Amino acid sequence: MKKAGLTLVITLFWLLVWQIVYLSVGQSILVPSPLAVFERLFEFCTEKSFWLSIATSLLRVLSGLLIGTLLGAVLAVLTSGSRFLKMLFAPALHIIKATPIASFIILAILWLSVENVPIFTAVLIVLPTVWANTEKGILSVDKDLIQMGKAFGLSRAEVFMRIKLPSVKPYFVAALNSAVGMAWKAGIAAEVICPYRDSIGSALHESKITFETVDTFAWTAAVVVLSIVLEKLIIGITSGGGRKNA
């Protein structure tokens, strides 16, 4: 209850700041009022196209998140067990980390079909984070515990489930915690740069072109809410039982 009350107070504070900025600027085309934005968002919620756009964007971002997570986990296993493979793939990891995501989006537009650009972008955002954190988790597994488990007659599967997996899991969950939000923002950014029908990014792009600032703010509010919900759902699923294991 205390946490909910504190969250409410903080939310009201920033809404008040927003209202003050709106009154100070005095031009709704630059900064619309909170009331106008939430009214527009409520109108969106009654439209079928709004939910279709959300479903389309969610599907593509989640696809990129899944692919990036799987690739990152596989590469983490490979590079943690081989010094040569670690040296071989290290330049690719550094390039992905250092290159602006906008550059990858522009290249993806040349290489891929429009609907696959957000997926590719999300993969590139997720992969290095999951890769680096998971590899760190694998390397941190206590070898003495593994030897002890073998001494007590645990099979390879039991050693993996009881010792290795609980040790790596916190690193993996932490990587997802960072990657989910970044994948969502990168995927929407890719949709804005490379608009595709019935998507959040295309709606944002259209509102920018038509100078519908209220619509832009309303869609942005929807993106923020969806990001929070998506992150909490995925982290809640992946970290389930984490305390018990600890």
Image (spheres, helix red, strand yellow):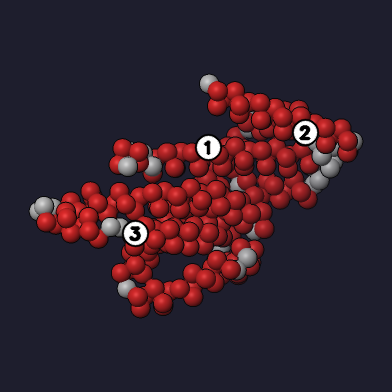
Out of 130 and 9, give the one closest to the viewer: 9
- Read off the residue under disc 1: 229
Identify the residue shown where x is 38% and y is 62%: 135
- Which mark lies nearer to you, 1 or 3? 3
Tell me the quarter of the picture where residue 95 sits.
Answer: bottom right
Dot 2: what SS? helix
Evaluate whether residue 142 shows in this view: yes
Identify the residue shown where x is 55% and y is 48%: 181
The 10 Å Cα crowd at callout 1, few under 14, some 14 to 19, many 20 or more, is few
Asked if marks 3 and 2 touch (Cβ < 8 Å), the reply is no
Tell me the quarter of the picture where residue 207 sits.
Answer: top right
Residue 84 lies left or right of residue 174; in this view the side is left
Kind of residue sitting beneath label 1: Val
**8 vs 243: above or below:** above
Residue 139 lies left or right of residue 90; in this view the side is left
- C-alpha span from label 1 to label 2: 24 Å
Dot 3: what SS? loop
- Read off the residue under disc 3: 140
N-terminal label among 3 and 2: 2
